Image (tube, rainbow, N blue to C red):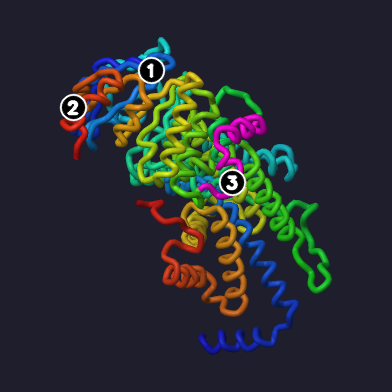
Amino acid sequence: MLKIEQLNAWYGRSHILQGVNLKVEAGEVVCMIGRNGAGKTTTLRSVMGLVGRIDGQVLFDGHDISKEPVHRRFAYGLAYVPEERRIVPGLSVQENLRLGLVGSTNRTREAEMIDRIAETFPRLRERLSQSADTMSGGEQQMLAIARAMVSEPKLIMLDEPSEGIMPVLIDEMFELFNRMKADGITILLVEQNVERALSLADRAYIMDQGLIVHEDTAAALLADTEIQERYCAV
Amino acid sequence: MWFHSIGLLLRGVRVTFDLFLLQLFTGVALGAIYVLVALGLSLIFGLLTIVNFAHSQFFMLGAYVGAFIMGFVGNFWLALVGVPIVVGLIGMVCERFLIRPLYGRGIDYPLLLTFGLGLIILEIVRMLAGTAGIPFGTPPSLSGAVDLGVFFFPKYRLFLIGITAVILVGLWLFLERTSYGLIIRAGARDQEIVQILGIDVSKVWLVVFGVGIALAGLAGLLAAPIRGVFPEMGVPVLVEAFVVTVVGGMGSLFGAVVAGLLVGITVSFTSFYFPQMATLSMFLLMALVLIFRPRGLFGRAGLLD
């Protein structure tokens, strides 16, 4: 579904990604782990088209999207939930959800969309008319995920969804990811919460200094504490 | 000189409630023009982070396009519909081919560009229509005064207040009730997230710039019977619009409305009580607001960072 080949990315003069190769098959949950600054976020942003200068191939669903503008990548079925839960302040929860629908070709009616959201995210249903920035961090993260899901993307990229969120809500969030996985949704996940992420994922990549340094099944990596120590310990 | 002012003030103190109301209405009518100009300026700044220095020349262009339409068909109402469309389209062409290449290069590039664009528009109008200015009478159906019970009020100024109210309600409905409005509100807060959600922001910017410029053109047409039509008619407007935008808070539409009316009313009252202070009064108001609220009445933090 997603195939990245020899991806290089720069921020200004600094060469952040130095030839990343990665793939995600349909229905798979793949996670990327590694220290801060390893290039995980830059990889996701490059795939979405948010990095100014990149080089290499990004194939999505058979199309080379590496030259496409951001909104076209969305149209191909690519969704991205950036870190620090970017819900739009000043907009209500419902308006934030509607925003996930207006750019999409998915002509689901808003009422239907809200019914579906209510099943998956009961917390949001009660807060539809509330201003989104008055919710807790965890609820805002749920909203950001729900907003990315309403367009029914083929692949959803999640960037550190559990960062700065209460433990109770992290449990709830990973339950949600498990349900998404069971529904056959393809996920590319970047997570600091290594154990949880590996228990959820099918496969995992370890990144260090702008490169993929290790690749294995999630189960194998979960057992390999030595490699976890080497690349993920702070 | 100053005792003359005091004399006027003393006369002012004795003025009756209906005279006060008359000044208030005059101020609101004056403010209506400020509101329309500042709304466009604020809309463009809030979304595109462009300080549009050509705004006042589009205002002037609106008056000229209006005079041109009037000269052809002699119908003010047709001009009222035609001017925002024509001027808005010119604005969109400018955005597409002049401003768009400068996005992402910081605030000073488009600022210089629009400054130059304003000068070009001014010179083109001078070349095509002459430097002398052209007559523009109040449309016959709107001249004269209406009896508002307590005082007689010029029909045209009442119309100004009415049409501005209609435009405000229309703009509000557009922003609050349509998908496009939702995109605009979200885009003003977080451009990137709007792109991530599949929206082609360059199209949105084009429309927003067009709407902002259309408002400036419309304001120019509406001001024409009061201020007259001449190439330099936009020059004071730029200053006034910036005062209004700064008082209201850069990028805040609600602020533009409140500050526009506030500045209009302030100018109206000072012209009556202290005519010499009329122009200065808006700057005093601005200074006063900035002392207590450095971001303006409804300004958001971080918009210029």
Find numbered disc 2 in the image and state the secondary structure of the residue it sits on.
helix
The residue sitting at 24% across, 25% down in the picture is A206
Answer yes or no: are tags 1 and 2 on the same subunit. yes
Query: Which residue was labeled with disc 1?
Result: A65
Decide which of tag 3 and tag 2 comes sooner along the chain: 3
Q: Is residue B122 visible?
A: no
Q: What amino acid is at disc 2?
A: Ile
Decide which of tag 3 and tag 1 comes sooner along the chain: 1
Magenta: predominant secondary structure element? helix
- Where is residue A110? Give x, y as percent: 64, 32
Q: CA distance from mark 3 to mark 2?
A: 43 Å
Q: What amino acid is at disc 1?
A: Ile
How busy is the neighbourhood of tag 3: few (under 14 within 10 Å), some, or many (20 plus)? some
Q: Which residues fall within the magenta stretch? A: A110-132
**Chain letter of the residue carrying label 2:** A
Quadrant for residue B105, please give it: top left
Q: Nearer the viewer, residue B93 or A21?
A: A21
How busy is the neighbourhood of tag 1: few (under 14 within 10 Å), some, or many (20 plus)? some
Left or right: A225, with B294 as reference point: left
Quadrant for residue A79, please give it: top left
The residue sitting at 24% across, 19% down in the picture is A215
Decide which of tag 1 and tag 2 comes sooner along the chain: 1
- Where is residue A121? Give x, y as percent: 55, 36
Determine whether B49 is above or below A157 in the image: below
- Confirm whether the magenta stretch covers residue A118: yes
Give the label on residue B114, or none: none
Quadrant for residue B13, please give it: bottom right
- Where is residue B237? Give x, y as percent: 52, 56
- Where is residue B159? Give x, y as percent: 73, 56
**Chain letter of the residue carrying label 1:** A
